[in-house]
Amino acid sequence: MSEIQETDVMMRIAAIASGIIVLIEAVLKIAGVSLAVWGWGAIGGAVALLLAILVILLGIRPIHYTPVFLGILGVGVIVFGVLIGGIIIIVATLLGAIT
């Protein structure tokens, strides 16, 4: 892990917080309540749940090129229909890329 990403506290906090938000939104999507009108239903919610776990793990222990991986995961979360959490993951990506 690079020292820059290890000390980038704002990116890590934003990644963990957005991962928790995606977890909540994915569970709601699996239950049938969703903010986004697109997505793949319960399957999309399950995939978003797995992506949220990866985002939280990247926030806890960042690796090299963490902002790139966060960006890819954020777009994936948005595609699977979890809108608000995906946008916050993109914000965490921008915070990591700026520093």
Image (cartoon, rainbow, N blue to C red):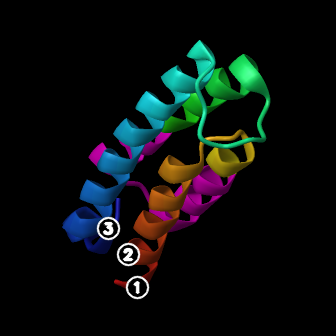
Q: Is residue 74 above or below residue 3?
A: above
In space, the residues marked 1 and 2 are separated at their CA atoms by 5 Å
83 inside magenta stretch: no
Mark sitting earlier along the chain (3/2): 3
For the view shown, which residue lies furthest in the top direction?
31
Residue 41 point in image, percent of width and height: 74, 24
Residue 18 point in image, percent of width and height: 39, 49
Q: Residue placed at 51% from the left, 51% from the top?
A: 84
Q: Amino acid at mark 2?
A: Leu
Considering the numbered disc 2 on the image, is that residue within a helix, a strand or a loop? Answer: helix
Residue highlighted by disc 2: 95
How many labels, in total?
A: 3
Residue 23 point in image, percent of width and height: 44, 31
* Magenta residues, start to end: 54-75
Q: Main secondary structure of the magenta part?
A: helix
Residue highlighted by disc 3: 5
Residue highlighted by disc 1: 98
In the displayed structure image, the side of residue 43 where residue 11 appears, left or right: left
In space, the residues marked 3 and 1 are separated at their CA atoms by 11 Å
Q: Amino acid at mark 3?
A: Gln
Considering the numbered disc 1 on the image, is that residue within a helix, a strand or a loop? Answer: helix
Considering the numbered disc 3 on the image, is that residue within a helix, a strand or a loop? Answer: helix
Residue 82 point in image, percent of width and height: 60, 42
